[in-house]
Amino acid sequence: MDSYAFLSDTHTGALIGVDGAVDWFCVPHFEGDAVFARLLDRRVGGAFTFSVATDAAPVRRYLPGTLVLESAYHAGGGSAVGQDFLAVRAGDAAQPFRADMLLVRRLLVREGSVRVRAEVTPRPGYGARPALWHRDADHWVAAEAGLRLRSGLPFRVDGAALRAEAVLHEGQTVDVLLGYGPGDIDELDPADLLERTCRTWREWSDRADYTGQGSDEVRHSAAVLRGLSFDETGALLAAPTASLPEEIGGVRNWDYRFTWHRDAALLLLALFRLGHAEEGRRYLRFLLSTCGGASDVLSPLVGIHGVTREEEILDHLDGYAGSRPVRIGNDAAQQLQFDTYGHVLDAALLYQQLTGELTGAQWQVLRRHVDTMAARWREPDHGIWEIRGPLRHYVNSKMMAWVCLDRGVRLADLVGDHDAPTQRWRAERDAIHSEVIERGFDSRVGSFVLAYDSTELDASLLRMPLVGFLAGGDPLVVATIDRIRRDLAIAPALIRRYAADDGLPGEEGAFLLCSFELVSALVLAGRREEAAEVFDQLRAYAGPLGLYAEQLDADGTALGNYPQAFTHLALIEAALNLDGAGDRDALHAWAERTTRPGTADG
């Protein structure tokens, strides 16, 4: 799975395999219909193949600072180099990236001759039905799939496929342009599109001045996150894919083309720290817009347009490597997850510290949610991991309720709201802290646990020092770190998020978010050498193009949706904490040092 290249124009994304096939492509945006869905069924899922006849796999890389894929081919009679990209151009402050809604595939023959084959077989409805091609002036049209194609290759219709084959000679270049939007594709110059796309990506990437620990991985992860940020709203997708399995052949297959609020504070910090303040502002505005409805219940996830599709099963697909059912939509949006409130308020506090730009209306929305948590934190919920079982008193949920109230108190001071009920918020915050210490730490296990009255472990509690609930060197935190490393590890540096019965058959792999958070927790515990060793081990698990999935099996097999935003976010956090190793989280410390002059310190 992790051999796939990820392309993005920040409006949609594509996955391209080593064989040159686009096996996943959604139109007209990330959450749209996968007209190429061979990723989930090699039998009926459509694909767009563009390959060179060769005995060896191409040598592939991203052009520096971009998500433009370059592939070098060496055949017996010649060599060629190709570029694949979704074309983008620079926009403005309101929308920094502008998608041309165009997938471009180029090939230049450098020496001798090479044979090229192309086949474009879209199947709308996630592979449910074919789309027929017809000729229209200088290009081809598959109206049902919303696609148009232009190329110098001699394409011909063969049933529901558009096919071409040609021998190219030294110095020749061939292009295939696949448009998925309303713009004209007939007059575009592919060379200009390549140059403009590379320039747009590099100008963005060059804003980051970070040169510390893991700088190459940090910069690449930032580009991946930018590729997962929706151009119209600033929403961050957890991943561009749906139903990639957490266990090969198993049922743990979910749609991740949504924004999870649990990523909010970390994404905001990463964007501002790496020089992308405008993207941070856009994301914060999107986040708060989704929290401003009439309901006091915050959904843990939303769609990139602010709404969420109901979950459904696609029975006609076999699933990745036979992993069924295939699901689109995500019913976790209906769950009660109290950690969501903490993540939103943490992000809002950081934003106010960094910019001072929260409006009165935005604060009133946030204040309402702090009041909700002050009233409801004693209730059980579904927990951060979306276990589809009974409500429980999850320790992480209590910890993040504490974060919500703590940030609410500090924000009221920062915005000068002297009428806010901060005395009550402080009292409830302190009550949560006492209860978690009393009921969330199990002396029999020797660590904090998943839920009250349980003995199960939960790797999300590695974030205790990162959110300031306890100091990194606190004996209870250190004991929890050590117990998680001992009992949730499946391989060096790889830890599961939990081992509890979650009501589903089978088991998942190591959760890479938690594995990278182990690095940060070790740093804050004063164990930097151990943290650096774990970080280096995790770096070695990256896919050949530096991309990470959600999970890994013990043998290094990638599992879950891909590429995964929160894995790359946690990598950035771990690298920055290693680089600024001290007695507290480097990113939060940086944010507080950056607090605007004249504002309160919280």
Image (spheres, rainbow, N blue to C red):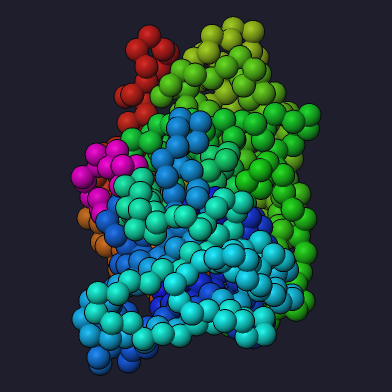
Q: Is residue 7 left or right of residue 545?
A: right
At horizontal 70% and vertical 73% (from top left) the residue drawn is 131
- Does residue 212 belong to the magenta stretch? yes
Where is residue 251 drawn, in percent x and y?
Answer: 67, 74
Total of numbered circles in the picture? 0
Between 462 and 233, the residue placed more toward the observer is: 233
At horizontal 57% and vertical 30% (from top left) the residue drawn is 285
At horizontal 75% and vertical 72% (from top left) the residue drawn is 314
Residue found at the far front of this picture: 137
Where is residue 60 drawn, in percent x and y?
Answer: 31, 72
Q: Is residue 342 positioned above or below 462 on the image?
A: above
- Does residue 267 belong to the magenta stretch? no
Where is residue 260 drawn, in percent x and y?
Answer: 59, 47
Q: Is residue 435 positioned above or below 460 on the image?
A: above
Where is residue 401 drawn, in percent x and y?
Answer: 61, 36
Q: Is residue 395 left or right of residue 541?
A: right
Name the quadrant containing residue 430.
top right
Whether residue 162 is visible here, answered yes or no, is yes
At horizontal 63% and vertical 25% (from top left) the residue drawn is 366
Q: Is residue 261 positioned above or below 94 on the image?
A: below
Whether residue 250 is visible here, answered yes or no, is no
Between 255 and 191, the residue placed more toward the observer is: 191
Between 334 and 583, the residue placed more toward the observer is: 334
Between 39 and 471, the residue placed more toward the observer is: 39
Write down the region rendered in magenta: 202-216
Predominant SS of the magenta segment? loop
Q: Quadrant of the C terminus?
A: top left
Name the quadrant containing residue 77.
bottom left
